[in-house]
Image (cartoon, rainbow, N blue to C red):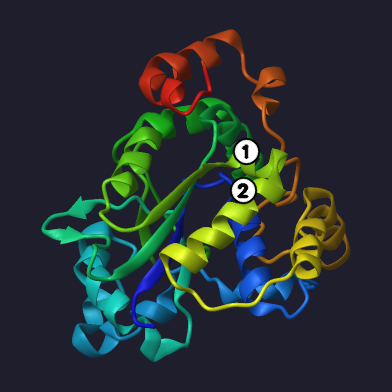
Amino acid sequence: MKKIIWIASYPKSGNTFLRFLISSLLYSKDGNFDLDIIKHIKQFDIYKYFRFVEKINLEDSKNLDKLNIVSKYWSEAQRRFFEVENKFIFKTHAANLRVNSFNYTNENRVLGLIYIVRDPRDIVISYSHHTGTSIDYNIDSLFNNRTTMTNSNGRIKIPLSRWDTHIKSWSFLNVPKYIIRYEDLIQNTDLYFSEIINFLKEELNVNFEVNSEKFNNIVKNTSFEKMQEIENKFGFDEVYKGKFFRKGESGQWLGSLSKRQNDKIKKEFEQTLKYFKYI
């Protein structure tokens, strides 16, 4: 398979939970797993997928932490991904933006998309704990069209933009797509995981086996409590500060945001918040 299935989201929106569900579905026999199974669905924006740049332009390969440089190689990296390893589903936090004349991705490179949305008021709480930055700082980042991040070792720049722009950038991609709220996925995992299975099988023709025993094992073993238990015992290499699986619940902003902070987010994103039934 030489086209990509993206699992895309703004940071701290449930991408990891979704990757556990899908990697267990595709890469385990019976739905039982350890943390390593998530490595089957890696972040795309890491240096190994851009190493070819060293042979094209050595100076550029040293400056992929600059958006105007790395954007030149997005398309080629996605054309070559299968030369690096036999994977076809990738996580990304990137917005699907156009930088200079270069699109992050396009229909020619993509088989399908699963996009997970989360209430931005919960994102800022979770991201503040994850990075050790203030809530107000993260609210301002949500509003900023120029917001970016880098991968864990700081080598690849990733465009984020505003929270609402991030969602729109992927919704406009003309490929089969499944868009889900994180809140729905954690509150009714059986139902929405079944829909994801149907999307992968029927819309994208992904070949895998699943029965009721495997399905139930996956749902049981990917519960947030189970993830916390595994992280406490073995650690988790995607954590930046504190615990990665800290709470994972919806509505935690209710006890953490001030009225001023809540009103500020609601005013800025009113239309999108209403569309996704967050207000």
Query: Label 1: which residue?
Result: 184
**Amino acid type of disc 2?**
Tyr
Q: Is any atom of residue 87 visible in this view? A: yes
The numbered mark, 1 or 2, whose residue comes first in the sequence reads 1
| In the foreground, 204 or 137 | 204
Give the secondary structure at mark 2.
helix
Q: Residues within 10 Å of mark 2 (few under 14, many from 20)?
A: some
**In which quadrant of the rendered view does residue 208 lie?**
bottom right
Q: What separation in Å lies between label 1 and label 2 (alpha carbons)? A: 7 Å
**In which quadrant of the rendered view does residue 51 lie?**
bottom left
Q: Residue at x 68, y 21 (%)?
A: 256
Query: Label 2: which residue?
Result: 192
- Residue 231 in the image: x percent, y percent? 80, 60
Left or right relative to 210: residue 45: left
- Residue 8 in the image: x percent, y percent? 45, 54
- Residue 122 in the image: x percent, y percent? 60, 31
Q: Which mark is residue 122?
A: none
Are the two marked residues, 1 and 2, in contact with CB atoms closer than 8 angstroms?
A: yes
18 is higher (above) or lower (below) than 79: above
